Image (tube, rainbow, N blue to C red):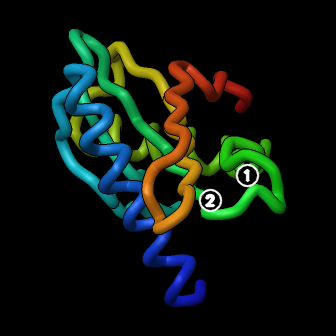
Amino acid sequence: MGREKREIGMLGERIALEFLQNKGYKIKCKNFRTPFGELDIVARHKSTLVFIEVKTRSTSSFGPPILSVTRIKQIHIIKNALFYLKRYGRIDADWRIDVVSVKLGHGLKPEIIEHIENAVEDIM
């Protein structure tokens, strides 16, 4: 991944963190590494454990950021979430997977932030 793309991704995650905290989400961790990849954000909202995938774009050339959460990406997110649940003995917890889509505008300022709750269904 190129340096600029990585920096845009990190900026999007910071924006998403603030956005979620303002909505009452309690952040448990970010960038949690697993053998299958990484969970961008793990949070608690009310009594539900929420795994959040953040997608950020600074251009509309390839459509909105949410389009990059393909079926294959969804499978990876589910595997990552199940790994986390198993590792921390939370396999019976109430959980879901959300996506926060961040579109950056001029000066890399957030232009559109979209939060899709329960965005990834159990497809395994």
Nearer the observer, 95 or 66: 66
From where the camera sits, is residue 79 visible?
no
**Residue at the limit of the structure toward the bottom, as seen here:** 3
Cα separation, mark 2 vs mark 1, equals 10 Å
Nearer the observer, 82 or 40: 40
Q: Which label number is shown at residue 17?
A: none
- Callout 1: few (<14), some (14-19), or many (20+) C-alpha neighbours within 10 Å? some
* Residue picked out by circle 1: 68
Q: Secondary structure at mark 2?
A: strand
Q: Quadrant of residue 49?
A: top left
Q: Residue at x 28, y 44 (%)?
A: 17
Question: In which quadrant of the rendered image does the N terminus lie?
Answer: bottom right
Q: Secondary structure at mark 1?
A: helix
Q: Residue at x 46, y 50 (%)?
A: 110
Cβ atoms under marks 2 and 1 closer than 8 Å: yes
* Residue picked out by circle 2: 57
**Residue at the limit of the structure toward the front, as seen here:** 106
Question: In which quadrant of the rendered image does the C terminus lie?
Answer: top right
Nearer the observer, 60 or 115: 60
Three-letter amino acid code of the residue under disc 2: Arg
Q: Earlier in the sequence, mark 2 or mark 1?
A: 2
| 4 lies above or below 80 | below
Three-letter amino acid code of the residue under disc 1: Ser
Using residue 76 as the reference point, say whether residue 71 is left or right of it: right
- Callout 2: few (<14), some (14-19), or many (20+) C-alpha neighbours within 10 Å? many
Q: Residue at x 41, y 36 (%)?
A: 51
Q: Residue at x 26, y 18 (%)?
A: 45
From where the camera sits, is residue 28 visible?
yes
Using residue 81 as the reference point, say whether residue 69 is left or right of it: right
